[in-house]
Amino acid sequence: MTATAIPNAATMTAPFDLTGKVALVTGAGTGIGRRCARLFAEHGADIALSGRKVDALEATAAMVRETGRRAEVLPADVKDPAACEQLVADTVARFGRLDILINNAGGSRAGSLDTWTLKDFTDMVTLNLQSVWLLSLAASKHMRGGEGGSIINISSMASLKPVTHSAPYGAAKAGVNNLTATMSVDLAPFGIRVNSIACGVIRTEGFLRAMDKLGVDAEMSGQNCAMRRVGLPEEIAWPALFLASPASSYLTGQTIAVNGGPA
C-alpha cells in the first residue's frame, strides 16, 4: 500500500481481517499485550510475542495457537538497543515479514518528585520512550518495502495531564505521543500508519499488584472517570485492532484516549 492507495473492495467488506499479516507485540506475557495477541490472532494474524518472562510468553503463545494461528516466543529486554534491533530481525527471519508493531512494553512506579534519582529518570525514559523509538525505526525499515504497515504505541493518560506520583513516566509517555505524530508524517509516504492509545486506569496484573502494594482499593481508582469503573485489557485490545486493521486506513498520527470518559 502507498500513501495514496485507497482500500479495495475486499478490505472494505472485511475491514478487521488481518489474515496473512504478522504482528509483533511487546509486553505480550500479560495484560494488554496478551489480549492484543489473542484478539489479533482471532482475526487472522500470526504473532511474534516478546517480553522478559518466558513462562508468561509461552502461556500467551498457547492462547494464540488455540485460534489456529502461529505464535513465536522471542524474549527480549527492550531497554537494550541491540535487543530491539535483534527482536525485529528475528521476527522477520521467523515469519518472512512484519506488518504490525504493538509497542506495549513499559511500566512505572510511584514516588514523590524528590525521590526520583537521575538513574530512575533515565531508566523510565529508556523503557517507555527509547524502546518505542528503536523498535519503530527497525520495524519501519521492513514495512517500507512491502504493503506498508501499522505501528501502535500504548501510551497513558499520564501523558496528557499531571501525575504527581510518577512525573518521569508521564514525561516519557508524552514523548511517545509526540513521536507518534512525527513518525506518522515521515512514514506516511511508505503506507505506514502510526497511532497511539492513551490508556486510562486498566485492570492489568501490574496495576493490581501496584494497588495492593499501596493498600489502595483497585476499583476505587476508576471513580475518576465518567463511567466510574476501571477498564479491562480487552477494552484496549479492541481499539488496537481497529488501528492495526484496514478499518482505520485513513487514520494516522493520532493519540486516542481510551479512559472511560472525562469526569
Image (cartoon, helix red, strand yellow):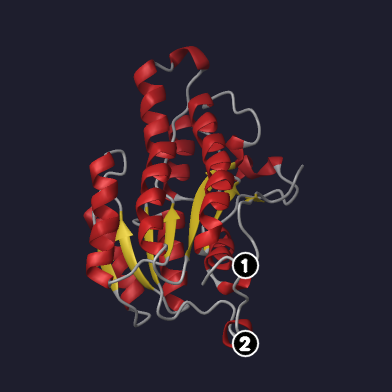
x then y, percent, for residue 6: 63, 76
Mark 1, other Cα within 10 Å: few <14 / some 14–19 / many ≥20: some
Please give the label number shown on residue 200. Answer: none
Q: Image quarter for residue 92?
A: bottom left
The label nearer to you, 1 versus 2, is 2
- Along the line of sight, which residue is nearer the eye, 150 or 147? 147
Q: Which residue is mark 2?
A: 9
Quarter of the image that includes the C terminus: top right
Image spot of residue 164 (x, y percent): 58, 23
Question: Which residue is located at x 37 percent, y 54 percent?
Answer: 26
Give the percent coordinates (x, y) of residue 8. 60, 83
Q: Amino acid at mark 2?
A: Ala
In the image, which disc is placed on residue 248? 1
Q: Nearer the viewer, residue 99 or 38?
A: 99
Tag 1 and tag 2, C-beta contact below 8 Å: no
> Is there any visible trace of residue 58 in the rendered image?
no
> Which picture quadrant has residue 248?
bottom right
Residue 94 visible from this viewpoint = yes
Report the side of 202 relative to 223 (left or right). Answer: left
Looking at the image, which residue is at 23% across and 69% down? Answer: 94
